Image (cartoon, rainbow, N blue to C red):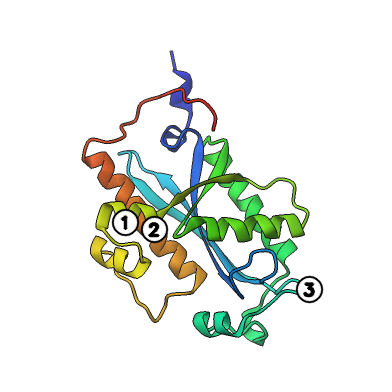
Amino acid sequence: MIEKNQLKHPLSLRFRGFLPVVVDVETGGFNSRTDAILEIAATTLTMDDDGELRIDETFEFQVEPFPGANLEPAALEFTGIDPMHPDRNAQPEFIVFDDLFKAIRGKVKFHSCNRAVLVGHNAHFDLGFLVAAAERCNIKRNPFHPFSVFDTATLAGLAYGHTVLARACQLAGIPFDNALAHSAAYDSEKTAHLFCQIVNRWRELGGWQPLDLDDDEI
C-alpha cells in the first residue's frame, strides 16, 4: 500500500508545507510604499533524492517605476541602475508580479507545498516591497506567506559569524564578485546558495531528518 506522503514531493515535508523561494529586489529607496522597485528576481529551490536542498530556477524581471514612485539618487548610485535606460526592457509592475506569482504558484504545486515562504538577506525588506507591489496591483492571490520569512543574514550570523552577504559567502566558500552584486538575479542566486549550504550542513550535523511531523499552522 502506498503511504499518502510517498505521493508528495520530499521538499513538502522539510518546511512544514512551505516552498522556500529566494527573493531579491533592487529599489529606488528604502520605503516600500513610496519608492520604486527596479528589479526583482526569485530563485526557487528543490530537493534531490538524497534530501539535499538545491537551486531549481531563477525568474528575473526589470520593473518600470510605478506612477509617482520616488527614486532616491543615492539608491540609484548604489545599485548602478538607470531606470530610464532604453535597453532595460522593463515592464509595468502589474505584468511583472502577475507573471512572477503565476510561476511561483506553479512551483508550489509541483513540490506538493501549500504556499511559498520568502527567503532573503534581510528578508523583511524584500517582503515589504513585494507585498506593497501586490497591493498596488490589486493582486489577490499572493503565493507568499504574509509575514513569515527565512532570513539569511540571521542564519549566516549564526553559522559563519557574519551578516553581510558578500562576507558570509566568502566564509562559506561561495564565490562572490562585488562587481556583479546589486543585481537582483546575482544576489538572489548567491543568497540561495548560502541558504542551501546552511540547511544542508545542519542536516549533516544531525539536525532535521526526513520525518513526517504534523505541525500546527503558524
Q: Residue furthest top?
A: 1
Q: Which residue is mark 3?
A: 67
**Badge 1 amino acid:** Gly
- Earlier in the chain: of badge 3 and badge 1, it is 3
Where's residue 120, x and y in %?
Answer: 47, 57
- Give me the residue at 47% from left, 35% from top: 12
Q: Label 2, label 3: how many angstroms apart (C-alpha)?
A: 32 Å
Residue count near mark 2 (Cα–Cα under 10 Å), binned few <14, some 14–19, many ≥20: many
State left or right for residue 56 relative to residue 76: left
Q: Amino acid at mark 2?
A: Ala
Residue under label 2, please give it: 153
The crowd level at tag 1 (other Cα within 10 Å; few <14, some 14-19, many 20+) is few
Q: Secondary structure at mark 1?
A: helix
Nearest the viewer among 77 and 3 is: 77
Question: Does 119 appear above or below 8?
Answer: below
In depth, the one of 126 and 104 nearer the eye is: 126
Residue at disc 3, secondary structure: loop
193 or 165, which is in the foreground?
Answer: 165
Picture coordinates of residue 182, whole percent (x, y): 47, 74
Tell me which residue sits at (51%, 25%) in the image: 216
Quadrant in the rendering for residue 125: bottom right
Could you tell me how far apart the alpha carbons at marks 1 and 2 are, in whole angstroms?
6 Å
- The reply to whether the C-beta atoms of the residues labelled 1 and 2 are less than 8 Å apart is yes
Label 3 Cα crowd, 10 Å radius (few <14 / some 14-19 / many 20+): few
Residue picked out by circle 1: 157
- Residue drawn at x 56%, y 79% is 75
Q: Residue at x 71, y 65 (%)?
A: 93
Of marks 2 and 3, the one in the foreground: 2
The part of the image, by quadrant, that contains residue 154 is: bottom left
Left or right: residue 171 compared with residue 9: left
Place of residue 212 in the rendered image (x, y in percent of width and height, measured from the top left): 40, 24
